[in-house]
Amino acid sequence: MVDMCFYIKTINPFISISRKEADLMQSIMNALNNNNCSLGVSSLKQLSQEVATKEKLIIKKDKENRRANIVSIVGLILTVFFGILSFLS
């Protein structure tokens, strides 16, 4: 089983990442093996754009999650507050 995993990783070392990024990394690997600098530089630029796009998406989702957490906390506090008010009256 370990030999099979090693074999798969040897054939496709970028199997654990997204398909687009894996293809770009494979292009970079091929460019390095074939001494094709222009292909390597082009693939690196595309890969850097992909990483930058994903980074922006992560930052956006993080902000959305923070806002959702704040709204949830405020909702919980208001629920408890009005629950206590209903028992007192």
Image (spheres, rainbow, N blue to C red):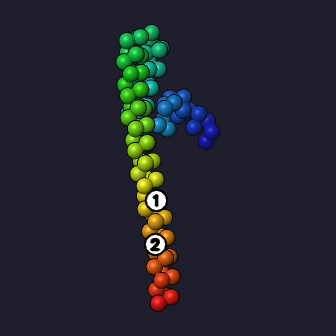
Q: Nearer the viewer, residue 60 or 82?
A: 82
Residue 36 vertical placement versus 43 (above, below): above
Residue 8 shown left or right of residue 30 in the figure: right
Question: Where in the figure is residue 80, as x and y percent of width and height?
Answer: 50, 76
Question: Where in the figure is residue 24, as x and y percent of width and height?
Answer: 40, 26
What residue is shown at x 43% (from left), y 48% (from top)? 63
Of label 1 and label 2, which has the lower sequence position? 1
Provide the residue designation for mark 2.
78
As drawn, the residue found furthest toward the bottom would be 89
What residue is shown at x 51% (from left), y 30% (from top)? 13
Identify the amino acid type marked 2: Leu
What residue is shown at x 38% (from left), y 21% (from top)? 45
Quadrant assignment, res 28? top left
Q: Secondary structure at mark 1?
A: helix
Provide the residue designation for mark 1.
70
Identify the amino acid type marked 1: Ile
Residue 54 vertical placement versus 34 (above, below): below
Question: Where in the figure is residue 35, as x and y percent of width and height?
Answer: 45, 9
Q: Compute the Cα span from label 1 to label 2.
A: 12 Å
Total count of labels: 2
Quarter of the image that includes the N terminus: top right
Q: Nearer the viewer, residue 8 or 43?
A: 43
